[in-house]
Image (cartoon, rainbow, N blue to C red):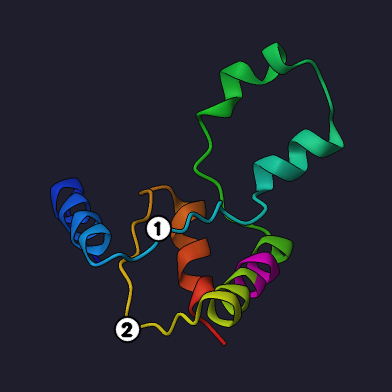
Amino acid sequence: IRSSPDEATAGLDAMRKKGNRILAVRHGESAFNVLREQHPLEEERYLPYMYLPDCDITATGVQQSREAGLKLEQDHGLNYGNFVLVVSPLRRAIQTALKLEQD
């Protein structure tokens, strides 16, 4: 795990020079995603709340993350010693990243 944005950038630059790919994965379903689906309102009504919660991923989000990890391994041959993982500091992103490598 890289500890700073500069280190992460250096890791990505090194990967690009070796001809490696950069893959992006969005976080698994979060509690806020569920709230928004259950109470569909106009977007502007959510704006005051959109950036407040640093919420957890749901059980569905955990499953989605594990499935994404398996798919990355199957489709791209990733084993968890040959890549750089850059993660947002938000809880839902960290939880997703941790579940990617389980199983």
Residue indicated by mark 1: 22
Placement of 52 over or under 22, stated as above or below: above
Residue at (23, 67) in percent of width and height: 18
| Residue 4, position as x, y percentages in the image | 17, 51
Q: Does the segment drawn in magenta span residue 63?
A: yes
SS of the residue at dot 2?
loop
Which residue type does callout 1 highlight? Ile
Asked where in the image residue 3 lies, by quadrant, the reply is bottom left
Q: Residue at x 72, y 17 (%)?
A: 43
Q: CA distance from mark 1 to mark 2?
A: 15 Å
Closest to the observer, 55 or 81: 81
Between residues 53 and 19, which one lies in front from this camera angle?
Answer: 19
Which quadrant holds the N terminus? bottom left
Q: Position of residue 11 (x, y in %)?
A: 20, 60
62 in relation to 13, above or below: below
CA neighbours of label 2 inside 10 A, class few (<14), some (14 to 19), many (20+) = few
User: Between residues 44 and 18, which one lies in front from this camera angle?
Assistant: 18
Looking at the image, how many numbered discs can be counted on the residues? Answer: 2
Magenta-colored segment: predominant secondary structure: helix
Check contact, mark 1 vs mark 2: CB within 8 A. no
Q: Which residues are magenta?
A: 62-67
90 inside magenta stretch = no
- Helix, strand or loop under label 1: loop
What's under tag 2, amino acid-wise?
Gly
Residue 81's tag is: 2
Q: Position of residue 59 (x, y in %)?
A: 71, 66
Quadrant showing the C terminus: bottom right
Q: Nearest to the eye among marks 1 and 2: give it.
A: 1
Does residue 1 lie above or below 7 as drawn?
below
Please say if 67 is above or below 2.
below
Q: Residue at x 42, y 47 (%)?
A: 90
